[in-house]
Amino acid sequence: MGEIVATARPRNSRSSRGRNLLAGLALGLALLPVLSLPASADCADVPAPGVDWRRCQFFGNDFSDRDFTGANFQSASLSNTNFENAQLDGLDGRRVHFVAAKMSGASLAGADLRDADFTSADLSGASLAKADMRRGRFYGTVFRNADLTGARLDNADLLNADLSGATWIDGKTVCDEGSIGQCRLKRTKAPGPA
């Protein structure tokens, strides 16, 4: 039988350690695109369904009649912007700022608008059916004739919001004219003596 001989491996010299380090660095750089986080928003992207405008800032732009279905506006600032008759269904609008935005006739059905700021925005005739508006700020927001069927308004601030003619969250109640800050039911006069 043959004899088993153990041999010691020579220690890496400085040059071989350097080569190993460079090889590891090259491998790491090659894997970087695979391991990197999802691409961040590009504020220069054109308005389109699914656009990612997270943390973007627009002021006074006209996006009326555009389709933003399923878009991501999370933490974006869109103050004084025109979204009249725009499609924003399924929007991720958490913490978005729509301060003084023109949004009459817009559709935000099923939108996630938690912690959003709609101070002084005009949502007349807008559809907010099944929108999640919890903890939102709606100071002086105009909801005249808007559809709030199934919307979640837990802890939302409706201070001075005009809800006149709006369909309330139950889908049946229509808020009386002059419903400021809360939905008031129409009062009917009780029949009196003849």
Image: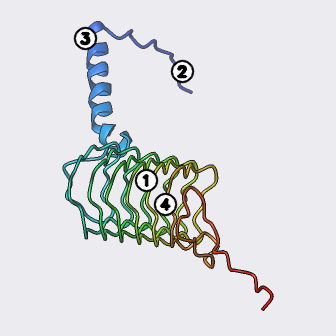
Q: Residue at x 60, y 57 (%)?
A: 153
Query: On the image, numbered disc 1 is attached to which residue?
Result: 93
Q: Quadrant of the C terminus?
A: bottom right
Secondary structure type for disc 1: loop
Q: Dots 4 and 1: beta carbons under 8 Å?
A: no
**Residue 162's mark?**
4
Q: CA distance from mark 2 to mark 4?
A: 92 Å
Mark 2 residue type: Ile
If you read the primary sequence from the N terminus, does the residue marked by circle 1 or circle 2 appear first?
A: 2
Query: How far from the left and from the top, in percent, is residue 47?
Result: 23, 61
Mark 1 residue type: Gly
Query: On the image, numbered disc 2 is attached to which residue?
Result: 4
The answer to which quarter of the image holds residue 106 is bottom left
The answer to whether residue 16 is left or right of residue 193 is left
Q: CA distance from mark 1 to mark 2?
A: 71 Å
Mark 4 residue type: Asp
If you read the primary sequence from the N terminus, does the residue marked by circle 4 or circle 1 appear first?
A: 1
Q: Residue at x 45, y 51 (%)?
A: 140
If you read the primary sequence from the N terminus, does the residue marked by circle 2 or circle 4 appear first?
A: 2
Query: On the image, numbered disc 3 is attached to which residue?
Result: 15
Q: CA distance from mark 3 to mark 1?
A: 55 Å
